[in-house]
Amino acid sequence: MAPKILLLFCNRESAAKDFSKFLAVGLFAHAVKELNITAELNNTTKRLQ
C-alpha cells in the first residue's frame, strides 16, 4: 500500500514540475510575441513619420 501512495506522490510532483515548465515556456513565448509586436509597431511609426 505504502509504495503505491509514494509512487502517486512522485508522479504528482513531476507533473507539477512539467506543468510549471510548460507555463514558463508559454509565458516566455507570449512575452516574445509581445516584444515582436511592439518592435513592429515602432518600425511602422518610424516609417510613417
Image: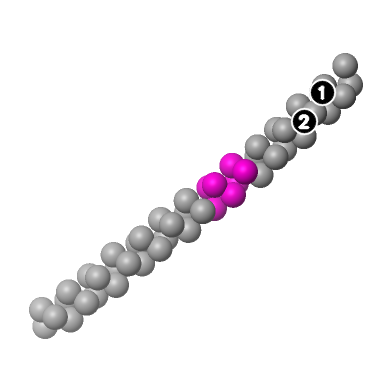
Structural distance between the alpha carbons of marks 1 and 2? 6 Å
Residue type, mark 2 in image: Phe
Seen from the viewer's position, the closer of residues 28 and 7 is 7
Which residue in the protein does label 1 denote? 5
The 10 Å Cα crowd at callout 2, few under 14, some 14 to 19, many 20 or more, is few
* Image quadrant containing the C terminus: bottom left
Residue 19 vs 38, above or below: the answer is above
Kind of residue sitting beneath label 1: Ile
Residue at the left extreme, as displayed: 48
Give the vertical position of 4 relative to 30 (above or below).
above
Q: Residue 3 location in percent, x, y?
A: 87, 24
Residue 18, horizontal then vertical, whole percent: 62, 43
- Disc 1 and disc 2 in contact, CB within 8 angstroms: yes
Residue 9: mark: 2
Residue 15's place in the image compared with 36, above or below, is above
Question: Where is residue 47 drawn, in percent x and y?
Answer: 14, 80
Q: Residues within 10 Å of mark 1 (few under 14, many from 20)?
A: few
Residue 20 place in picture, x, y as percent: 60, 46
SS category of the residue bearing label 2: helix
Give the quarter of the image for residue 1: top right
Q: Is residue 23 magenta?
A: yes
